[in-house]
Image (cartoon, rainbow, N blue to C red):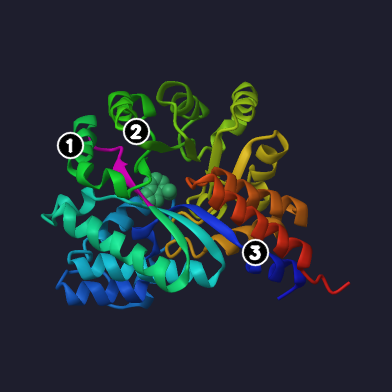
Amino acid sequence: MDRMEAFIRGMPKTDLHMHLEGSLEPEVLIRLGERNKRRLRWKTAQELRAAYEFQDLQSFLDLYYEGCQVLVEEADFYEMTRAYLRAAHAENVIRAEVFLGPQSFTDKGVAIAAVLDSTLEAMDDARAEDGISCGLIVSAQRHRTEQDALDLLEQVRPWFGRILGIGMGGAEKGNPPSKFRRFFRACRREGLRITIHAGEEGPASYVREAVELLGVDRVDHGVACVDDPELMREMAELDIPLTVCPISNLRLKGVPSLSAHPLKKLMDAGLHVTVNSDDPSYFRGYVSDNLVECQRALGLTAEEIVSLVRNGFIAAFIAPAERRAALARLDTYVSGFDWGR
Ligand code: ADE
Ligand code: ZN
């Protein structure tokens, strides 16, 4: 490992855009499938891993939702969450904000309490055992109706005090943010933070809708705004964070290579860019891998890497005292790092 890679891997960092369901490693997915007697198309982890070749977002989502059927019991959600937080802690993530989409499970008869309580319990244990700071964002699926999202919001009501907010993922094209205007207004009325995936496969106009129509706190992905210079100026002016996931964009063929990724263009235009993992198992990359690979492909300087990681702490849904402490910890790490020169 070279010094730059060691620097990146050792940095205290955030992961603000990841889906717990996308952290299930193939071995775990196969094991849970057997435990819950779910018929899968793959017999072994090796076979499943070989299926992780995607043409676009939809081809990934098809597999991802199929994988979700192995999650049935409370213990499954607990194990998945605890395993991700352990992996995050091991790569020096000190703040993780994670998505979970209950509709995949409640649709199949799993009680919402089984999904949320076990996930939150694993987060409590990770905090207590590893000292990792973490929070849950409940995610709604945009290929469903707005009424489905509103129903989910009602189901989640008893947990409002224990979650960070509400997000939205799923098939983007044809399901613009404007489809969920009433839903996000209802979330806001409840005092919940809101984020939405926009400009991942969809156009820049979806990012504009997310910001102007919904008034989101962060845009997940948001990379398409590189196509609209006026929007980029507005995003920079408003300082709305983008939770970018470069390896995800590469695997879903949003970009032909990481060297063609707009990450640096967005940074140079003054946007609040953060780097995150999205679905680390399916895309073969945790947040440190994303930073290392972007540094190499785009020739980012150590200062630019530090700026991306700082942006993560600034964009995190944490109290000012925690933010100050995290930024101080980052500064201490950066100034004390031995470059061997
Ligand atoms: N759900 C999980 N990963 C996603 C992604 N990359 N885009 C939209 N929805 C998702
Ligand atoms: Zn995502």
The percent position of residue 115, horizontal first and vertical second, equals 22, 57
**Main secondary-structure element of the magenta-colored stretch:** strand
The percent position of residue 116, horizontal first and vertical second, equals 24, 55
For the residue marked with disc 2, what is the amino acid? Answer: Gly
Is residue 57 among the parts visible in the rendering? no
Q: Is residue 90 above or below residue 175?
A: below
Furthest toward the left, the residue is 109
Mark 3, residue position: 11
Mark 2, residue position: 191
**Residue, x 31% and y 37% (percent of image)?**
142
Mark 1, residue position: 151
Q: Earlier in the sequence, mark 3 or mark 1?
A: 3
The percent position of residue 96, horizontal first and vertical second, equals 47, 57
Residue segment shown in magenta? 136-144
**Residue, x 53% and y 53% (percent of image)?**
276
User: Between tags 1 and 2, which lies in front?
Assistant: 2
Q: Is residue 64 left or right of residue 289?
A: left
User: 133 or 92, which is in the foreground?
Assistant: 133
**Residue, x 17% and y 43% (percent of image)?**
155
Residue 141 is a magenta residue: yes
For the residue marked with disc 3, what is the amino acid? Answer: Met
Kindly report the distance in space between the C-alpha atoms of the residues bearing marks 1 and 2.
17 Å
